């Protein structure tokens, strides 16, 4: 499988890609600046017009999302020409995979042979499935008389394979020596992929909201209205994926015919070439975003100073413009919703609710089993050291990939049916949807575990004997499960609400786009222009569409759930504080996190692991 260009990218190709990156950022950054202004206005309006408290019942876990570090020996396909060689692999807590020649290199602090961020990868464990995927990448050319090279993938020993596949990166091929090791690596790698993929969605920072909205608007300007998985990853990775998606057709037509080799050797060369293109674009985008960072920070500070003094007047203007736009769009929008959306809304709603409900039911079962396991050890009067170990294990349940797989698997069960229902509306973001279900399940498990330990610490003292302690803990168990049921129900409703908007809103906007004429009377247009980028006709128009769509969604959810109460809503999916004419509005759609109090933060990078809190008094 040595079929590859002597140099993956020549100077002409590198200069061409640099020009493409410059063009992307030149077109994207104005969108980003505008969305930063809108995000600052949104943030200030929330501060000045706070909503009712969300009322989360569970305590918020202080542990940040992370991946357990996983390491061990695997056999890897690497080198030139590629051949199977032993490697010592390490999955870091931030979702980055590294490989070394042997364990000693890693333990002595040596530099890895290679590493990759797991963003966008998929794990396959079927040899035949991977070979079919590889064969489909580069079908054999008719009349190709070139002799096919030896295929090391066919020489793979009878073992337990692990293939990391990516649409625009080089594939990584490993095998383990036991089924147990293969499963442990698969679960660990899947956790790393999810952690890397949802870093922006989980961020509560206004800049993350602004970035994702800017990506959506940029792609709408390119004529792409459907939602997909391109927004998985960090800011630089997202923009790299956007550009790779734009360039891929030309790359296939211009480069693929010239690659040497046949069969899988040619396919392997194609993945190497794509990896070189991806690396060049990622490096360029990362450099551009770093250069933009000082301007962004200065812009946010300036926006804060200029928007805050006039925020009341700005919001009144926004409401006035929204009422005018609502009157103009109501008729065409209602017609579109009746014609295109209403027939499928109930089905998609039910499927989303059942998917989230099944995952939360699995979380509740695990939570109850974990608490019961603690009771059994307490009744058995174990040593203090053993009990502390069990308490530590209970607190680590949310980060145990083997244990949580029971919950994560539920997120996958309805994937195919949901895709069938959503695909007619241009929705291709199933991986993002599945990740969101898994993130919510993990967060609620973490919150419930933290709540149990905190309540137990409050009611238990060293003066209690085991029988008294057990009775107290049984009361705590009931309280935690009740709190979990309440917060879980709210999470299920908000999850469905968020993803119904993500499925239907881009489609509706695309349907209305051809006949959309966003014009205001001259006086209002001049006033709006004076507000800078914080208020735009386009932004207010989308908020109006979203608000009307949400009214329909909320009615459907009320029918499905029998209630409209929301006790704990995810961050970024509250109704807007600038409500117009009673229309609900989404604000930070598809962001991660919860509205329960949490430490402020602005980084969109994967966060490091925090140390565990000390053992609590009773468990000492």
Image (cartoon, grey):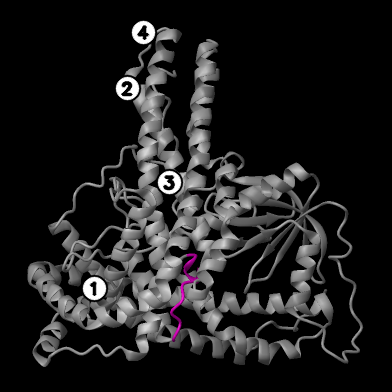
Q: Which residue was labeled with disc 3? A: 64
**Residue occupying the point 22% across, 82% down:** 537
Q: In the picture provided, is 21 more to the left or to the right than 308? A: right
The residue carrying mark 4 is 463
Cα distance in 3D space between marks 2 and 1: 45 Å
Depth check: give the residue in front, 91 or 110. Answer: 91
Residue 137 relative to residue 24: left or right:
right
- Residue contact between numbered discs 3 and 1, judged by CB atoms under 8 Å: no
Determine the secondary structure under disc 4.
loop
Q: How many marks?
A: 4
Q: Are marks 4 and 1 in contact (CB under 8 Å)?
A: no
Q: Is residue 424 magenta?
A: no
Instruction: Determine the image quadrant of residue 575.
Output: bottom left
- Viewer-proximal residue among 270 and 333: 333
Q: Is residue 447 above or below residue 73?
A: above
Task: Give the Cα separation between the discs numbered 2 and 4.
Answer: 13 Å
CA separation in Å, label 3 and label 4: 34 Å
Q: Which mark is residue 37?
A: 1
Mark pair 3, 1: CA separation: 28 Å
Q: Which mark identifies residue 458?
A: 2
Quarter of the image for residue 581 reads bottom left
Q: Vertical placement of 260 versus 470: above or below?
A: below
In the image, which residues are magenta?
223-233
Q: Secondary structure at mark 3?
A: loop
What percent of the width, then of the height, locates residue 432?
50, 62
| Quadrant of the image containing the N terminus | bottom right
Mark 3 vs 4, N-terminal side: 3
Q: Is residue 132 left or right of 50 when viewed as pictured? A: right
Q: Secondary structure at mark 1?
A: helix
């Amino acid at each position: 499988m040595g079929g590859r260009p002597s140099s993956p990218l020549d100077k002409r190709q590198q200069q061409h890609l640099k020009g493409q990156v410059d063009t992307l950022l030149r077109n994207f950054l104005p969108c980003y600046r505008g969305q930063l202004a809108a995000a600052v206005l949104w943030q200030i309006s929330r501060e000045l017009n706070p909503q009712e408290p969300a009322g989360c019942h569970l305590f918020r876990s202080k542990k940040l999302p992370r991946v357990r570090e996983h390491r061990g020996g695997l056999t890897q396909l690497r080198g030139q020409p590629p051949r199977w060689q032993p490697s010592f692999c390490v999955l870091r807590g931030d979702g980055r995979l590294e490989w070394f020649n042997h364990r000693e290199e890693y333990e002595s602090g040596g530099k890895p042979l290679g590493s990759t961020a797991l963003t966008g990868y998929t794990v396959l464990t079927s040899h035949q499935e991977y070979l079919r995927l590889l064969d489909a990448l580069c079908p054999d050319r008719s009349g190709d008389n070139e002799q096919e090279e030896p295929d090391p993938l066919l020489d793979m020993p009878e073992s337990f394979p692990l293939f990391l596949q990516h649409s625009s990166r080089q594939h990584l091929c490993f095998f383990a020596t036991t089924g147990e090791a293969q499963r442990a690596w698969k679960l660990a790698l899947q956790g790393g992929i999810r952690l890397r993929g949802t870093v922006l969605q989980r961020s509560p920072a206004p800049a993350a909201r602004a970035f994702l909205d800017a990506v959506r608007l940029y792609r709408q300007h390119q004529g792409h209205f459907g939602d997909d998985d391109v927004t998985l990853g960090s800011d630089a990775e997202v923009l790299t994926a956007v550009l790779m998606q734009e360039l891929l057709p030309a790359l296939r037509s211009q480069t693929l015919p010239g690659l040497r080799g046949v069969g899988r050797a040619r396919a392997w060369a194609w993945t190497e070439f794509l990896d070189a293109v991806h690396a060049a674009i990622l490096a360029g985008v990362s450099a551009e975003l770093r250069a933009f960072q000082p301007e962004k920070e200065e812009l946010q500070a300036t926006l804060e100073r200029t928007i805050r003094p006039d925020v009341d007047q700005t919001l009144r203007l926004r409401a006035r413009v929204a009422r005018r736009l609502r009157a103009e769009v109501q008729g065409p929008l209602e017609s579109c919703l009746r014609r295109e959306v209403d027939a499928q809304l109930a089905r998609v709603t039910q499927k989303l609710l059942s998917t989230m409900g099944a995952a939360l039911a699995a979380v509740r079962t695990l939570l109850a089993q974990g608490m019961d396991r603690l009771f059994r050890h307490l009744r058995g009067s174990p040593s203090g050291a053993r009990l502390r170990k069990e308490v530590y294990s209970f607190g680590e349940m949310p980060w145990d990939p083997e244990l949580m797989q029971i919950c994560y698997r539920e997120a996958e069960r309805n994937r195919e049916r949901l895709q069938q229902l959503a695909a007619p509306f241009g929705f291709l973001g199933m991986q993002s949807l599945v990740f969101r279900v898994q993130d919510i399940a993990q967060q609620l498990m973490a919150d419930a575990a933290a709540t149990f330990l905190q309540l137990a610490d409050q009611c238990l003292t060293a003066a209690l004997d085991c029988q008294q302690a057990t009775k107290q803990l049984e009361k705590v168990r009931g309280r935690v499960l009740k709190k979990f049921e309440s917060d879980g129900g709210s999470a299920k409703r908000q999850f469905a609400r968020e993803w119904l908007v993500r499925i239907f809103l881009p489609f509706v906007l695309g349907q209305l786009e051809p006949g959309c004429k966003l014009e205001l009377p001259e006086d209002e247009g001049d006033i709006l222009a004076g507000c800078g980028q914080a208020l735009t006709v386009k932004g207010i128009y989308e908020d109006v569409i979203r608000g009307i769509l949400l009214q329909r969604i909320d009615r459907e959810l009320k029918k499905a759930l029998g209630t409209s109460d929301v006790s704990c809503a995810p961050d970024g999916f509250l109704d807007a504080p600038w409500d117009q004419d009673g229309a609900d509005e989404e604000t930070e759609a598809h962001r991660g996190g919860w509205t329960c109090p949490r430490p402020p933060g602005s980084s969109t990078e994967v966060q490091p692991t925090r140390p565990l809190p000390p053992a609590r008094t009773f468990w000492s």
